[in-house]
Image: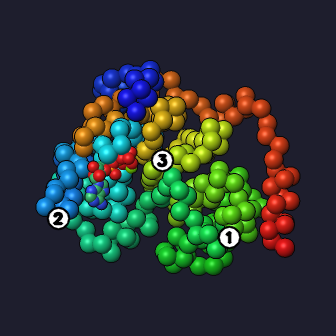
Amino acid sequence: MSAILEREPEIMPLTAAAIAPEAQARPVIELEHIHKTYVMGEVEVHALRGVSLTINEGEFVAIMGTSGSGKSTTMNIIGCLDRPTRGTYILDGQDVSRMSKDERADIRLQKIGFVFQGFNLLSRTSAFENVELPMLYSGVEAAERDRRGREALASVGLEGREQNHPNQLSGGQQQRVAVARALVNNPALILADEPTGNLDSRTSIEVMEIFQRLNRERGITLVLVTHETDIAEYAKRVVVFKDGKIRKDYRVNNQRNAAEELKNLPPVQDDDDDDDMAEIVQE
Ligand SMILES: Nc1ncnc2c1ncn2[C@@H]1O[C@H](COP(=O)(O)OP(=O)(O)OP(=O)(O)O)[C@@H](O)[C@H]1O
Ligand SMILES: [Mg+2]
């Protein structure tokens, strides 16, 4: 891990000038002096020890740091899956730190899309049905579900794969279904915890291309946890955790461009094989 952190992207300190473009933007995430303590019998684990972090609308932030430094704990709080022990969390102008479980579930459904390392797709249902699920929970009617589900799958390059089950899709395609599912309720914020952790390097770039496009074209705010400096360089800003605190916070000077990189990679010719496989499995 330390070896990875030593090779940092070109950095610029986060001065007023550096944050100027986003200074006008509305904060989406405001964490103020957040502490999280897990009590396990006699033992207290101080997972977060005073984290303050503001992320504005339209930012693309990579969270890095050693194992156990508090990245997932922070993501769980940002994603309203868990509450801080102390401190305040304002999400999109609303104080969510003291909301009930049900209220947080509503907020989550309306405002946040999640993408996980292990894809977390339901294995016995099709790509379309996986994407449809958040819309079922939020009471979207059938015709609208159909329209939005197809559109979300098309936007991640999976047109025509609506009926494939996860085991009929490659790892990268499964992660794209998960991204489509995260998108389908039109969230203000997408949270991704090591979304490329199980993917090879080309497929990782393909997923990062989708994230960069969503951020650039639709202004979606993105927060992504990664262990890989290479992946963090696709973001605009990097926040590094250590021992439950933020140790560094800097802007990426030379942001990588996934779309450009993909153009320069040799083409892959596995699509026909994929189709044959899908037909065989379906028979
Ligand atoms: N549910 C829990 N109960 C008790 N301790 C926990 C719990 N979740 C996390 N911890 C502890 O809190 C600390 C921070 O964990 P966290 O999962 O946030 O780390 P992380 O930075 O995401 O690590 P990794 O890179 O390994 O995913 C660790 O010491 C961990 O053991
Ligand atoms: Mg983690």
Q: Which mark is residue 144?
A: none
| Position of residue 246 measured from the top left corner of the image (x, y, whole percent) | 27, 37
Q: CA distance from mark 3 to mark 1?
A: 24 Å
For disc 3, the neighbor class at 10 Å (few under 14, some 14 to 19, many from 20) is many
Distance between the alpha carbons at the discs numbered 1 and 2: 42 Å
Circle 3 residue:
194
Residue displayed at 64% across by 73% down = 125
- Looking at the image, residue 254 sits to the left or right of residue 201; the answer is left
Question: How far from the left and from the top, in percent, is residue 67?
Answer: 36, 43
Query: Mark 3 or 2 closer to N-term?
Result: 2
Instruction: Give the secondary structure at mark 1.
Output: loop
Q: Quadrant of residue 20?
A: top left
Q: Residue at x 55, y 58 (%)?
A: 119
* Amino acid under disc 3: Glu
Within-10-Å neighbours for mark 1: few <14, some 14–19, many 20+: many
Give the residue at mark 2.
Answer: 41
Residue that label 1 marks: 126
Depth check: 86 or 13 in front? 86
The furthest residue to the left: 42
Query: Of discs 1 and 2, which sits in the foreground?
Result: 2
User: In what element is the residue under mark 3?
Assistant: loop
Could you tell me which quadrant the N terminus lies in?
top left
96 up-or-down from 212: above or below: below
Residue at figure coordinates x 69%, y 54% from the top left? 170
User: Which numbered disc flags the more N-terminal residue, 1 or 2?
Assistant: 2
Where residue 68 appears, as percent x and y from the top left, is 32, 45
Q: CA distance from mark 3 to mark 2?
A: 30 Å
